[in-house]
Amino acid sequence: MTALTLLDYASVLIFALTGALVASRAQLDLVGFAFMACLTAVGGGTVRDLLLDRHPIFWVGQPDYILIAVAASVLVFFTAHLVESRYNWLVWLDSFALSVAVAAGTGAALTLDQSGVIVVLMGVTTGCLGGLMRDVVCNEVPLVLKQGELYVSCAFTGALTAVLAARLGAEPAFSLALCALVCWALRAGSLMFGWQLPVYKSRPPRN
């Protein structure tokens, strides 16, 4: 099993848990849990593979990704009521999922010898789109767009770090590990310490 495959498995599992947690907040049934877990788990990776023209799409070639997501949804369905603050669990699990998925998407593009711009975009796409689909479908405020928190910028910086490390001759495994670490550190800092980028503030029109 390659490092990229392990990253895909890890991102599928953790993102599936977040999808099921959102389903619990929406009070869906077990089928709804499974749907949300699968959508979140494979959404970003599916778009990545379609854009990179990778055949078959990763979960079509290995359906056990879907089985892992469904198993995660069943686990959360029967245990979510034991968690005191499901939202806190959601945002922290999502931070780990984001970091792993960005590394997976970045690594997939690197193995295809894509340009640096495409590699970074594939990392951001893989990391952000699954969670965005999850939140939009369940009518939640998307974490990716939540004001006052770093999210897409974390994915961008992590993917860019991997590209720069690879250009400097670092081993692929080290580049991807650095990608995940930088991405998670920024996201965790935003959650814990309020790190953020300046936001647009409207001003009255000038006469």
Image (cartoon, rainbow, N blue to C red):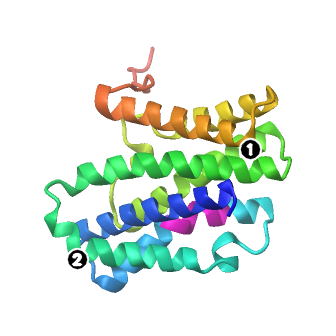
Residue drawn at 30 percent across, 31 percent down: 192
User: Which corner quadrant of the image does residue 57 belong to?
Assistant: bottom right
Q: Amino acid at mark 1?
A: Val
Quadrant where the N terminus is found in the figure: bottom right
Quadrant hosting residue 171: top right
For the point 17% across and 60% down, the residue is 83
Vertical position of residue 35 compared to residue 50: above or below: below
Task: Look at mark 1 in the image and give the residue it sits on.
Answer: 119
User: Label 2 to label 1, Cα distance in Å?
Assistant: 39 Å
Foreground: 173 or 23?
173
In the rendered image, is residue 8 in sight? yes
Q: Nearer the viewer, residue 154 or 196?
A: 154
Q: Residue 130, labelled with which disc?
A: none
11 relative to 140 in the view: left or right: right
Query: Splitting the image into 4 quarters, where does residue 173 fall?
Result: top right
- Asked if residue 79 lies in the magenta stretch, the reply is no
Q: Magenta segment, which residues?
A: 41-47
Q: What type is the residue that disc 2 sits on?
A: Phe
Residue at the image position 75 percent from the left and 31 percent from the top: 170
Residue 185's x, y, as percent?
A: 45, 32
Vertical side of 51 occupied by 39: above or below:
below
Name the residue that disc number 2 marks.
78
- Classify mark 1: helix, strand or loop: helix
Residue at position x 15%, y 68% in the image:
81
Q: Position of residue 42 (x, y in %)?
A: 56, 67
Work out whether mark 2 precedes mark 1 in sequence or the reverse, and give the earlier one: 2
Query: Where is residue 193 drawn, in percent x and y?
Result: 31, 25
Q: Position of residue 70 (x, y in %)?
A: 43, 78
